[in-house]
Amino acid sequence: MQKSVLLLILTLTFTLGCTSRYATTEGSTTSIELQGVLYWNDSEEPVEGAVVKVENVDGIRSKTDKKGKFILILPKNGSYTIVALDEEGRKIHEGRLLAPRNSRNLYLTLFAER
């Protein structure tokens, strides 16, 4: 598990100058779309059917598709613990994510332990 935390490769691609659909007014909150992919760390094959979620936050979860892809919608910038569970509910990944201020889209690659 320690290896997967270190391998939480954050390819944080965030946009500062966004299109009008992300325009906000002062005092409003804007959600952050987190797109990612989950691979097995020993083979780099995608993990299908895993649940990726934000720990200790109800309702923020996604299931990986056959390519290991998932999307989570984070309510705001901040620090989150991202976990992945296999189809039997075992934790196969855990890592911290810092969603920077002014970010709207984040991309990351996760590696899971078998």
Image: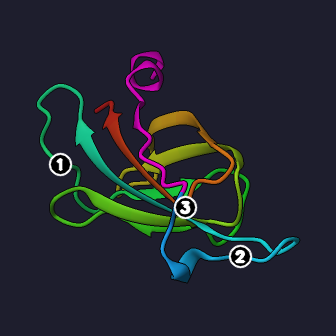
Quarter of the figure with the N terminus = top left
Q: Is residue 50 above or below residue 41?
A: below
| Quarter containing the C terminus | top left
Amino acid marked by disc 3: Arg
Q: Looking at the picture, how far across and down is residue 57, in whole percent? A: 72, 60
Whole-angstrom CA distance, mark 3 to mark 2, is: 11 Å
Sequence-wise, the earlier of marks 3 and 2 is 2
**Which residues are drawn in magenta?**
1-16
- N-terminal of the pair, mark 1 or mark 3, is 1
What residue is at 17 percent from the left and 48 percent from the top? 46
Residue at 47%, 17% in the rendered image: 2
Disc 1 secondary structure class: loop
Q: Give the image's coloring scheme.
A: rainbow
Please indicate whether residue 104 sits to the left or right of residue 59 in the image: left
Badge number at residue 46? 1
Q: Mark 1: few, some, or many residues within 10 Å (few <14, many ≥20)?
A: many
Q: How many labels were placed on the picture?
A: 3
Q: Residue 56 at x, y = what percent?
A: 73, 53
- State the residue lying farthest toward the bottom: 21
Q: Are marks 1 and 3 in contact (CB under 8 Å)?
A: no
Q: Residues within 10 Å of mark 3 (few under 14, many from 20)?
A: many
Question: Which dot marks residue 27?
Answer: none
**Amino acid type assigned to the residue bearing label 1 in the image:** Pro
Where on the picture, by quarter, is residue 67?
Answer: bottom left
Asked whether 13 falls inside the magenta stretch, the response is yes
Of the numbered discs in the image, which one, if any, rests on residue 104? 3
Asked whether, in this view, residue 74 is left or right of residue 106, the answer is: right
Quarter of image, res 40: top left
Mark 2 and mark 1: Cα distance apart in space: 36 Å
Q: Amino acid at mark 2?
A: Thr
Residue 24 - label: 2
Looking at the image, is 77 positioned above or below residue 41?
A: below
